[in-house]
Image (spheres, rainbow, N blue to C red):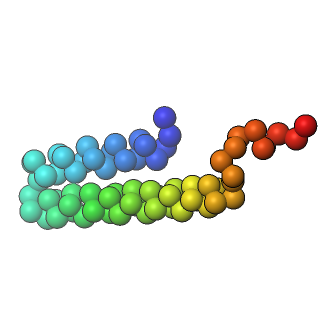
Amino acid sequence: MTVQLCQDISVLEDAIINLTEGASDEKYAALYSLEKLLLSKKNELAEFEYVTSLELADSDGYACNQYSY
């Protein structure tokens, strides 16, 4: 379990509480935190896809080529 995962869980738990029990300003804060989390995850996915595409472009698809005989 990573620190980032624990932080994400905390954001989601807080948002659920604020959306169900909070006043209007707390609901806006909860929506903001969810939007921020979503944007962060989208950026993380885009970076992963970019790095993966670079790695695939550098490889010929054969795992055996990583070994020198």
* In the image, residue 55 above or below residue 66: below
On screen, residue 15 versus residue 5, left or right, reads: left
Q: Residue furthest top?
A: 1
Residue in view at x 76 percent, y 38 percent: 64
- What is the x, y in percent for residue 35? 27, 62
**Whether residue 33 is visible:** no
- What is the x, y in percent for residue 43? 43, 63
Residue in view at x 14 percent, y 59 percent: 27
On screen, residue 52 versus residue 20, left or right, reads: right
- Given residues 66 and 44, the one toward you in this image is 66
* In the image, residue 40 above or below residue 61: below
On screen, residue 23 versus residue 16, left or right, reads: left
**Whether residue 45 is visible:** yes
Q: Residue furthest right?
A: 69
Residue in view at x 88 percent, y 41 percent: 68
Give the quarter of the figure containing the C terminus. top right
- What is the x, y in percent for residue 20? 10, 47
- What is the x, y in percent for residue 18? 16, 51
Residue 41: quadrant of the picture: bottom left
The total of numbered circles placed on residues is 0
Residue 57: quadrant of the picture: bottom right
